Amino acid sequence: MSGLIGKKVGMTSIFDENGKNIPCTVIEAGPCVVTQVRTEEVDGYSALQLGFDDAKTANKAAQGHAKKAGTVAKRKVVEFQDFEGEFKLGDAVTVDVFKEGQFVDVVGTSKGKGFQGVVKRHGFGGVGQSTHGQHNRLRAPGSIGAASYPARVFKGMRMAGQMGNERVKVQNLRVLKVVAEKNLLVVKGCVPGHKNSYVIIER
């Protein structure tokens, strides 16, 4: 599985050859430096460890690890197993590993929305749709228990709580453009996270 680490630039839209307006996301993908090469003999599996975005400050361990690859410590480090192609320690992996028209998966951390109620978090209907039997409380969750047996609330019950700030993978996004000279990747649709958040692009 090949891939790159990138940074979400933002969203825009482009027109295709038929004049259809397509929403898309611009990602600054790489260049990433190979900071470690995992092998079957030493580690028990094969993988490439890539680093992205120079860190302004880093501890001695991170500095020493990056020094072996002839680079500076990175803010984001990710491993990709069974990476296609031959790369060695210190090599740069660029956006050229992707081609226009192919499909990729993008992993990111969704926007945190804080503590939210059941209407926003789970789409409950409120009084108008008589969700969960509530009587006169517009956005309340209603009954959450079953009966005197089992006399407890089941795990996984949809209730109010922390929303967002989770690892999310969006699959099968088509690559619309690869701008190699600016290290930009344009994919169809939206990807998780806020602007300037780190994302992992896999193919």
Image: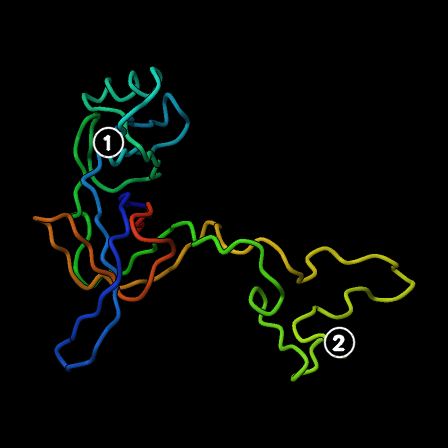
Circle 2 or circle 1, nearest the eye:
2
Q: Which residue is mark 2?
A: 134
Left-right relation of 149 to 21: right
Which residue is farthest right? 148
Left-right relation of 113 to 129: left
* Mark 1 residue type: Asp
- The disc placed on residue 45 is none
Q: Looking at the picture, how far across and down is residue 96, in whole percent?
A: 14, 48
Where the N terminus falls, by quadrant?
A: top left
Compared with 198, 48 (above or below) is above
For image coordinates 20% across by 55% down, the residue present is 185
Compared with 147, 203 (above or below) is above
Q: Earlier in the sequence, mark 2 or mark 1?
A: 1
For image coordinates 16% across by 34% down, the residue present is 92
Q: Looking at the picture, how far across and down is residue 150, in whole percent?
A: 87, 59
Q: Looking at the picture, how far across and down is residue 23, in whole percent?
A: 26, 70
**How many marks do you count on the picture?**
2
| Alpha carbons under labels 2 and 1: distance apart | 54 Å
* Mark 2 residue type: Gln
Left-right relation of 90 to 154: left
Answer yes or no: do the residues labelled 2 and 1 have beta carbons within 8 Å? no
For image coordinates 33% across by 34% down, the residue present is 77
Badge 2 crowding class, 10 Å Cα cut-off, few under 14, some 14 to 19, many 20 or more, is some
Local secondary structure at mark 1: strand
Compared with 181, 13 (above or below) is below
Q: Which residue is mark 1?
A: 54
For image coordinates 76% across by 58% down, the residue present is 154
Left-right relation of 39 to 132: left
Badge 1 crowding class, 10 Å Cα cut-off, few under 14, some 14 to 19, many 20 or more, is few
Local secondary structure at mark 2: loop
Q: Nearer the viewer, residue 193 or 96?
A: 193
Q: Nearer the viewer, residue 30 or 13?
A: 13
